[in-house]
Image (cartoon, rainbow, N blue to C red):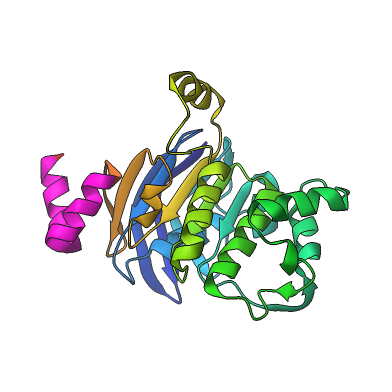
Amino acid sequence: MLYIEDLEVELEGKRILRHIDLEIKPGETHVLFGPNGSGKTSLLMTIMGYPQFKVVGGKILFKGQDITNMPINERASLGIGMSYQRPPTINGLKTRQMVKICSKNKEEDEDKTVELAKRVNFVDFLDRDVNAGFSGGEIKRSELLQLMAQNADLMLFDEPESGVDLENITLVGNSIAELLEKQIRPENEKSIIRQKQARSKMGLIITHTGYILDYIIADKGQVLYDGVLSCTTNPREILNCIGQMGYKECVRCIVDKN
């Protein structure tokens, strides 16, 4: 459903992503590791279509369409959504209004908005301006609420654990798992089979800590190092490798192994 081939991206005249190849199939969730400044957020912003990230080579396909030069709003309408690490405060726009803007059905009744807000314990924030005075955990829950309303097919998460305290991390992790249809503990074998048959949502998650892996079933892990997507393997293996040897040696080790 998402296919990226030989992607080259520049920001302010500097090459920041080089020869990126990535495929995420329906139902798959990928976890993206990498040090600060390696290009992880730039990759997500490029997929989302931010014009300052200039594609100078390669292409991005989504649902069989070439979206390489498609504007952000059209990509969102096509089914791509993103949860930002540091989303802006929007004074004068209520969270309740934002949720309705994100919804594919703009005529959804008030009960639906409240129902979604209850899932992330956010009903009391619906009449506050978007992100105004919100804590880190509240911002993440606001972002999740908007993604729930959008019901996107491909969801991009930029460090969902960042700025989230212990009280909120379980709610955030479980909500992401539910959005991606990737809950980590199905009730029984039959529900595992049903989940595999029903999954269609795709996810690409940036993480530094790996805490998100305690809540979701991730299919693949990848390392983005110095603007290059270096390897694809089990995300737990990558996390352990990074912890033991650091990013540079981890990339060399996994590439040599493959």
Residue in the foreground of this view, choosing between 232 and 185: 185
Q: Is residue 82 left or right of residue 73?
A: left
* Image height of 14 relative to 55, above or below: below
Q: Residue at x 42, y 47 (%)?
A: 215
Q: Position of residue 241 (x, y in %)?
A: 17, 53
Q: Quadrant of residue 133?
A: bottom right
Residue in the foreground of this view, choosing between 243 and 83: 243
Residue in the foreground of this view, choosing between 205 and 114: 114
Whether residue 126 can be seen here: yes
Q: Position of residue 198 (x, y in %)?
A: 56, 26
Dominant SS type (magenta):
helix
Q: Residue at x 12, y 60 (%)?
A: 245
* Image height of 92 relative to 8, above or below: below
Magenta span of residues? 236-257
Q: Position of residue 128 (x, y in %)?
A: 76, 74
Residue 238, magenta (yes or no): yes
* Image height of 59 relative to 24, above or below: below
Whether residue 19 can be seen here: no
| Quarter of the figure with the C terminus | top left
